[in-house]
Amino acid sequence: EDTAQKTLLVPPRMNYYIQKNMEIQKIFQDFAAPDDIFPYSIDEGFLDLTSSINYFIPDQTLDRRTKLDLLAARIQQAIWKKTGIYASIGLSNANPLLAKLALDIEAKHTKKMRVNWSYEDVPRKVWTIPTMTDFWGIGHRTATRLKKLGIHSIYDLAHFKKKWESWACSFGFTLTALMKAMFTSLIRSSHTA
């Protein structure tokens, strides 16, 4: 009852959320070409910074990971200055799936609100995700089905030896796509580094 007395009911403001999303999408265009911006949901999106990172951070003495962090900090600052919203950012030098996992699992809980995961982090950070449903694309039904196969962790899933394509049609296809995405380097392959 105490919780109910402290609960504040507010009307949904979807038009306001859409307006803020559009403002943020516009900010993204200050850092990446429109073809390199991939909106994912009302509050998430992917940016491929391959083409613009050296423009914004030209220092050749810095490695790509450092440059990516510096540019992400600039994006966060621009979002804050123009919208008043604190943005969490998942980064990856490797692929969008690792960036999404970095966002969902770690970035939202760090002081900087951004973190970068790479292939080297997979055994330590991805395979140790404590709950299967914390992995992007795995819901409760999928986790239940995986447990019936003896798969109880992301580590188990990554090391499962069956051919997913031949198992349960779209379910197998989805798992195959997730595992392949873990080792796919770019959203699309038109860029050269």
Image: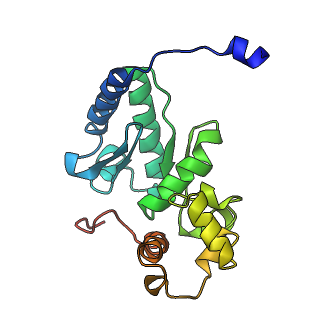
Q: Who's the residue at 25% across and 39% down the image?
A: 29
Could you tell me if residue 131 is visible in this image? yes
Q: Who's the residue at 65% across and 16% down the image?
A: 7
Residue 53 picture location, percent across and down: 34, 51
Residue 146 picture location, percent across and down: 62, 72
The quarter of the rendered structure image containing the N terminus is top right
Task: Determine whether 103 is above or below 20 in the image.
Answer: below
Q: Nearer the viewer, residue 109 or 13?
A: 13
Q: Who's the residue at 42% across and 37% down the image?
A: 43
Picture quadrant where residue 149 is located: bottom right
Task: Determine whether 177 is above or below 56 in the image.
Answer: below
Residue 145 picture location, percent across and down: 61, 71
Picture quadrant where residue 5 is located: top right
Task: Determine whether 130 is above or below 159 in the image.
Answer: above
The quarter of the rendered structure image containing the C terminus is bottom left
- Left or right: 152, with 87 as reference point: right
Task: Determine whether 138 is above or below 105 in the image.
Answer: below
Q: Nearer the viewer, residue 139 or 65?
A: 139
